[in-house]
Amino acid sequence: MTPVLFAVAAAAGAVGRYAVARWFCTWHSLLGVNTAGAAVLGWILTRDVSEATMTIVGVGLCGSLTTFSSFALEVHRLGVRWGIGYGALTIVSVTAAASIAGTL
């Protein structure tokens, strides 16, 4: 059952990321999605959940919601000047979100 739920969660994360990117069409949308996904992952990592739940939610949902490839593409698209700032902002925001959510 875990592989099926993993696939459903991964599909939901990918569709969610795509939908947010299509509706908002800015780098802000990817920043928000990555930050939200990091918060969910930070929260679930500090909970006493089963290995199956961690695989489904942590790897499946959060892994497909927050993709490094989308982040790298956006950094490249923004160019050197804005891409470096965006990259730094993303790293700070996702780290903070995961840390804060882990304490809740």
Image (cartoon, rainbow, N blue to C red):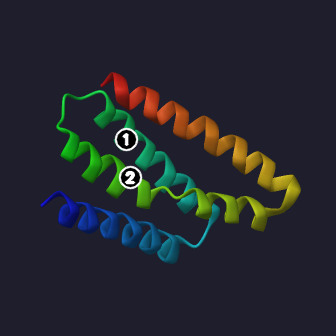
Label at residue 62: 2
**Is 34 displayed left or right of 11 in the figure?**
right
N-terminal of the two: label 1 or label 2?
1
Q: Residue furthest right?
A: 81
Q: Residue furthest bottom?
A: 22
Q: Position of residue 35 (x, y in %)?
A: 49, 46
**Is 55 displayed left or right of 49 in the figure?**
right
**Is 8 displayed left or right of 58 in the figure?**
left
Q: Residues within 10 Å of mark 1 (few under 14, many from 20)?
A: many
Which residue occupies 71% across, 41% down? 88
**Amino acid type, label 2:** Cys
Which residue occupies 32% across, 33% down? 45
Q: Quadrant of the C terminus?
A: top left
User: Separation of disc 1 and disc 2 at Cα?
Assistant: 6 Å
**Amino acid type, label 1:** Leu
Q: Residues within 10 Å of mark 2 (few under 14, many from 20)?
A: many
Q: Residue furthest left?
A: 1
* Residue at the disc numbered 1: 41
> In this orientation, which residue lies closer to the viewer: 64 or 25?
64
Q: Position of residue 86 (x, y in %)?
A: 71, 50
Which residue occupies 48% across, 55% down? 66
- On the image, which quarter does residue 78 sit in? bottom right
Image marks 1 and 2: residues in contact by CB distance under 8 Å: yes
